[in-house]
Every structure is written in structure tokens, then in C-alpha cells.
Image: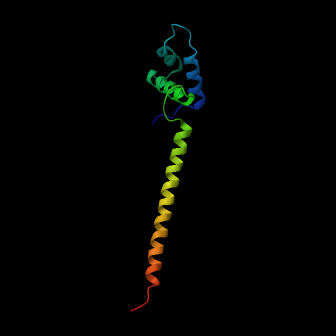
Amino acid sequence: MPRPFPAEFREDVVRVARNREPGVTLSQIAKDFGIHEMTLNKWMRKADVEDGNRPGVTASESSELRELRRRNRLLAQENEVLRRAAAYLSQANLPGK
């Protein structure tokens, strides 16, 4: 699997593509930077989402959601342990027959 391009490179390419002269195509810019045109299109869509120009989930929102889901799983596991411990302890304290 090829290594991803550095973030600075992606940002520079998107900036050049956004500020291109009339008549310069995205295909030409992609070729000049040695990337595929679809890659440039994907980077530009992602940059539009990050800038708020297009609806979608930003990288920070995605990261926060991933962290919250991880935390939710952990809390659910802790809750299950406490529920089982409470059930075990309530059985242990029953008067003997």
C-alpha cells in the first residue's frame, strides 16, 4: 500500500488548485504534482468539508465521535462488571437454608 502524502503537501496542492488561473484544469494540476486527478478531487472535497463550504463530517468531529464511541464501550463494559458483581454479592448474602 502506498504511503499517504503528507498533510502539508495535500494542503499546498488544494491551495494551488483553488487559486488556479483560468484555463488551467484540475487534470493538469494533478499531473504537475504527480497525483491522480481523482485524488485531487477527493482532497478538494475533503477541504471543502473542513472549511464548512460543503456538508459533511470534519476530521475533528470524526475523531471526537470515535473517542466517544470508545468511551461508551468502556463504560458499558464497566457497567456490566458492576451489574454482575451486584448480582453475585446479592446471592452471597442470602440467608442459608
- In this rendered view, identify the residue nearer to me: 64 or 95: 95
Question: What residue is rendered at 59% in x and 23% in y?
Answer: 12
Residue 80: horizontal and vertical position, in percent? Answer: 46, 66
* Position of 76 relative to 41 (above/below): below
Q: How is the image coloured?
A: rainbow
Question: What residue is rendered at 49% in x and 16% in y?
Answer: 26
Q: Quadrant of the N terminus?
A: top left
Residue 49: horizontal and vertical position, in percent? Answer: 52, 29
- In this rendered view, identify the residue nearer to me: 26 or 82: 82
Question: What residue is rendered at 54% in x and 27% in y?
Answer: 47
Residue 73: horizontal and vertical position, in percent? Answer: 48, 56
Question: What residue is rendered at 49% in x and 23% in y?
Answer: 40
Q: Quadrant of the C terminus?
A: bottom left
* Position of 26 relative to 1 (above/below): above
**Farthest residue in the top direction?**
23
Residue 51: horizontal and vertical position, in percent? Answer: 57, 28
Q: How many numbered discs, if any?
A: 0
* Position of 4 relative to 95 (above/below): above
**Farthest residue in the left direction?**
97
